[in-house]
Image: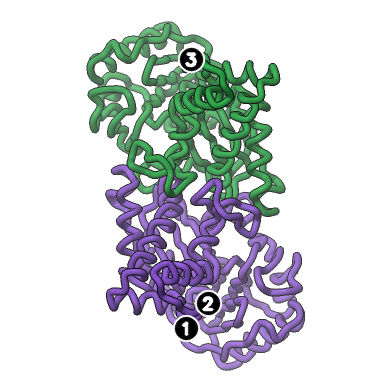
Chain colours: A green, B purple
Amino acid sequence: MPETPLAIGVDIGGTTIKIGLVYRSNVIEQIPPIATQEFDGPDSLVEVVIDSIEELRSRHRGIAGVGVGVPGFVDFENGIVHNLTNVAGWENYRLKAVLSERIDLPIIVDNDANCMAFAEWKRGSGRGLNHLVAITLGTGVGGGVVANGSLLRGARFAAGEVGQMTIDWQGRPGTYNNSGALEEYIGNKEIAGLAQQAYLDAGIERALEDCTPSQLSKAAHNGDEVALKLWDLIGAKLGSAVMNCCWLLNPQAVIIGGGVAKAGDLLFGPLTAHLYSQLSGPFKEHLMVLPARFGNEAGMIGAAAQSLEAAGVAILP
Amino acid sequence: MPETPLAIGVDIGGTTIKIGLVYRSNVIEQIPPIATQEFDGPDSLVEVVIDSIEELRSRHRGIAGVGVGVPGFVDFENGIVHNLTNVAGWENYRLKAVLSERIDLPIIVDNDANCMAFAEWKRGSGRGLNHLVAITLGTGVGGGVVANGSLLRGARFAAGEVGQMTIDWQGRPGTYNNSGALEEYIGNKEIAGLAQQAYLDAGIERALEDCTPSQLSKAAHNGDEVALKLWDLIGAKLGSAVMNCCWLLNPQAVIIGGGVAKAGDLLFGPLTAHLYSQLSGPFKEHLMVLPARFGNEAGMIGAAAQSLEAAGVAILP
């Protein structure tokens, strides 16, 4: 069997564009991150992405595909980006067609959370599984689903939006008027706001920028009662949404990544307690709740791996 | 191509056992329903089921399989019934093995809601679709999921439990201590209790048995404000759970059946209004919300159809 080929992963985020050469589960060479907001639309951004891809190709042989992850809704089949969250000017942009005109490699374009889920499934914490849910916790909350051994895309390639699922039918409206959207409760900003209020209720004034998840982790590790209660609350809310995924999909594993997941046991402890106590036998007896293997390289690694699948290459872990 | 063969469908419910000979989407001969509670355990019940199957086989040729639907958790692969809701004495019962010793036909055993979903997918409102969610509303709330063109069973064959999904992370506990379980809000009994209270709040005393979904339908059709408000509330709560299924699975259709669905537009009107107003484009533009084709024959039809699949027979609509 030939060595697993190289692939290029491009992760277009709201803040930076990451472009790297991926071999299995490693980014072996990365172009310095590019600020997304430098560009006023997709055309100029794509030029820089193409230059970077050509740069990597000029230095390496055996590159079999290019995968691009974007933060928004994508028509995966046709490689059309419907729109992007926090990136202006992208509307029904035919990214795959534009790239394919210039680059003679198999190209895939997908939602970034799907790329993360694919990375964890093929090369991360979910290797060898057939049924899993991957969730990424950050400014927004995203997700991807593997069912019956394939990435579940749904009717319009939009499946896996865990962050838009409700935990309260009468709760605060999300981006799409969806009452009680999980993202409105455990997104980065929402956690900070909640923490600030909780400290205030305890008679402590604290600036919003001192209430980030990483600072709440430090505080909790030092025994701060307010922070500990907050992590339990986050675990309960996330646990409720994860529970819904479990009742509906009966997965083997739920994989949690993203910045907020760096809290480790502070999050996973309450999360698993709230989750397992609300599931029956067949849903919990074999259920694994796992931290994601990959951090901010997940998008690149998953996009690159997906392009190998599109190129017809066997994806080894 | 040979004519689609006959199959026998057995639907073991909490109240009655229905056994019928199924041809495509029709039950062409049915054994008179048998009261489930007559039996103190699976062994005596299974004897009667076998007698009925033999009776049908003695009168008809070309029967290719037997499918059994049960109200509980089933290991589909091995045909083991883990336990049944409202039917005593079933615990890890090897139903498929017991039946196979006596009947020389391919046999499948599955959860009744999965059978209903299979019936609607292959022969009902969901024909030709690859991604759908089927929900049945009655004393309990059950469901089944089709994704990527196959019934989604999950890690332990337990997927599709829509009735256990939460609509309120702090809500009333369900059967499995699951806070805010949908079933606790829109099950038959819960609707009646809610209606009785709503009438009382409006200064009207009404007996619980006069608050069934069918009576609430009649009242609403006559312009009864309390009943109309109740159907809107039921639509909002069901809509919230359906919304979660849509964000996670991005289905082409959601199919709603069971007794409560007989309310028709009284339910589907509020349901679709609450649902569509909380979904973004790719999730709603092509989404169909459809009434189920089959009523209380769904279990037999779906179980029979699944046994044909197990027998390797092409399933025509």
Give the label on residue B27, or none.
1
For the residues labelled 2 and 3, the Cα–Cα distance comes to 62 Å
Whether A128 is drawn above or below A58: the answer is below
Residue wearing tag 3: A207
State the image coordinates of residue B81 (x, y, percent, origin top left): 69, 66
> B203 left or right of B64?
left
Whether A33 is drawn above or below B310: the answer is above
State the image coordinates of residue B279 (x, y, percent, origin top left): 34, 46
Looking at the image, which residue is at 66% across and 72% down? B86
Which chain hosts label 3?
A
Which chain hosts label 2?
B
For the residues labelled 2 and 1, the Cα–Cα distance comes to 8 Å
- The residue mark sitting in front, 2 or 3, is 3
**In which quadrant is the N terminus of chain A drawn?**
top right
> B205 left or right of B103?
left
Label 2 or label 1, whichever comes before in sequence order: 1
Looking at this rendering, what residue extends furthest in the front direction?
B203
Quarter holding residue B92: bottom right
State the image coordinates of residue A49 (x, y, percent, origin top left): 33, 14
Looking at the image, which residue is at 46% across and 28% down? A190
